[in-house]
Image (cartoon, rainbow, N blue to C red):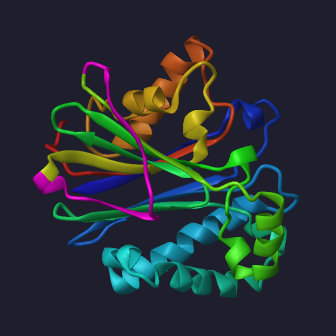
Amino acid sequence: MYSDHATITGTHYSNIAHTSEDYAFSADASDYSWAAVSDGCSGATGRSDLGARVMVLAVQALIEQYGPEVINSGGFKKMFYAACVPWYALMKTDDMFATLAVVAGDCNAVYATVMGDGAVLFKYADGRVGLIEVSYPENAPDYPIYHIAPELHERWKTAYPAPKQLVRIVYSAAGELIEKSALDGDVWRFFPAVEKIVCVAVASDGIGSRREKSSIETVREILDFKSTSGAFLQRRLGSVARRSWRESRTEPFGDLSVAAIWFGVHHA
């Protein structure tokens, strides 16, 4: 069990030499691993790349203090917002417009959640690949900052009353759709040892920003690891982005960050 994380700048920003507004990080403790990504709002006027880092640092502090089970606790969101407040006091409100997607756990139980938009990716030992995608109408997610500064949340609810959309998709190893269903809830649990899951990952919404390519197609490419040694995710994401996507002109329009935990057999 070990983790890795990777980020590529989407064509929207790379074409103008703009800083990526995503941030990803992962780490391994003696008895668990965790991985997180955050996506700064491209429409914000502040430095949302800094806000993205704050989101990941805040959840890191909670996981290191309470363990991965904190994500599954009823008070997680309140604790997370409180962990962001000291950073918020040093920054402008527009700097904090960033999402968070995090996964943490061990071979027995893994917990994942998305605050704002983003996705949870998973792969089984038999080659099946799945995706839980969280999105909002008009690309206006429920950012954590709305709950740190409640007056912003009221304005957001008035402007964007439509609910978030949650969908779970699973494809067979041969690429056939075998499941597509709506979901409820905010936290999803996986049991790698029992369910024969080899990888659970989180991704920013750039996963769905490739031209003429669906999110699940991108997931299948990213999780098709040729080797799981060392920086396995950086190597894989860099390879498909540099070769396959660039050659086919299907690079993501938006920044794409992925952070993963590998539970399967080690492949050198």
Q: Quadrant of residue 127?
A: top left
Q: Who is closer to the viewer here, 94 or 213?
A: 213
Q: Residue furthest right?
A: 45
Which corner quadrant holds the N terminus? Answer: bottom left
Q: Quadrant of residue 265?
A: top left
Q: Who is closer to the viewer here, 208 or 259?
A: 208
Q: Residue at x 67, y 35 (%)?
A: 10
Q: Position of residue 24 (x, y in %)?
A: 53, 55
Q: Position of residue 138 (x, y in %)?
A: 75, 45
Q: Who is closer to the viewer here, 139 or 49?
A: 139
Which corner quadrant holds the C terminus? Answer: top left
Q: Is residue 193 left or right of residue 52?
A: left
Q: Is residue 140 left or right of residue 230?
A: right
Up the image or down, 237 lies above or below 104; here it is above
Q: How many marks?
A: 0
Q: Quadrant of residue 153?
A: bottom right
Up the image or down, 89 lies above or below 177; here it is below
Q: Residue furthest top?
A: 248
Q: Is residue 244 left or right of residue 264?
A: right
Q: Residue at x 46, y 64 (%)?
A: 186
Q: Residue at x 71, y 65 (%)?
A: 50
Q: Position of residue 261 (x, y in %)?
A: 31, 53
Residue 186 magenta-highlighted: yes
Up the image or down, 91 lies above or below 188; here it is below
Q: Residue at x 47, y 80 (%)?
A: 76
The stretch in magenta equals 174-194
Q: Who is closer to the viewer here, 232 or 34?
A: 34
Residue 248 magenta-highlighted: no
Q: Position of residue 244 (x, y in %)?
A: 49, 17
